[in-house]
Image: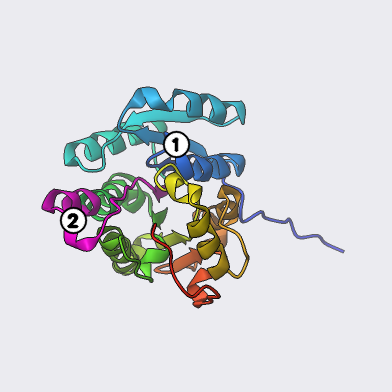
Amino acid sequence: MSSVPSHNFFDLTGKVALVTGTSRGLGQYMGRALARAGADLVITSRKIADLGPFKAEVESLGRKAFPVELDVRNYDSIQNAVKAAVAHYGKIDILVNNAGLNVRKPAVDLTWDEWNLVLDTNLRGEFFVAQAVARESMIPNGYGRIINIGSVTSVFGYAGLTPYSASRGGVKQMTMSLADDWGKNGITVNCLAPGWFKTSQNAVLYENKEWLEYIVDRIPMRRPGSPKDLDGAVVFLASDASEYYTGQTMIVDGGITTGATRATVAPKA
């Protein structure tokens, strides 16, 4: 009886992943998941000194970590960072387009500069990082996994989050266009959309007991997300297991986008 060698479609050994915004938060968690699956990393931040602790952690897992300074709001910074990464490793197989920010305030109070800050970072920045990685490595090599980071606001609207929701909705639409554009080059492009996860950006909200109870009441799983809840999704989208999965938005939200709700009145955030 002959045996067929098994293949671990989730093994990222030999792959190089560039993860933007890895000085803190979900970027670090997703980078850590990719490293544990076997990938070597390009880690980025606007201040390269902030990457020292995470570099050491990745290396303690037996993987390589190349720190690069990257400001996704600056075109030259994007080009320089991607070229440095390709020069160092010879390729970039995986991109996790994580860097982002938010301005939380009533729509009538938003300023022109605040709108531009959010859109330039979350939408324009994601596009030009993806473009640079595709141009410099993925298209020439005929292989790539691009994971754009969206949010439940890619499909839902929330008061006080107008520019953020606009940017994340744009990421969802951009993802579909890039998937169609680059599929012929062996590149998959997907949007990973987390629900309510506690990060440094929104930590103050979780200090509001009334608000937290309201959010949990709307989540069928009855709790906010924890970083480990994204591990399987990001590894799947980065791996050969998702070879025929592209142009999609994968929502990891505990079910909040089902529209389930038990609370009647939303407290002020």
Instruction: Read off the residue under disc 2.
Output: 110
Front disc: 1 or 2: 2
Q: Quadrant of the N terminus?
A: bottom right
Instruction: Read off the residue under disc 1.
Output: 24
Percent position of residue 104, x then y:
30, 53
Q: Residue at x 51, y 30 (%)?
A: 64
Q: Quadrant of the C terminus?
A: bottom left
The image quarter in which residue 267 lies: bottom left
Per the rendered image, the range of residues in magenta is 93-119
Residue 64 is at least partly visible in this image: yes
Residue 30 appears left or right of 163: right
220 vs 44: above or below: below
Label 1 CA crowd tier, 10 Å (few <14, some 14–19, many 20+): some
Q: Residue at x 39, y 26 (%)?
A: 50
54 vs 94: above or below: above
Amino acid type of disc 2?
Leu
Does 244 lie within the magenta span? no
Closest to the observer, 206 or 176 = 206
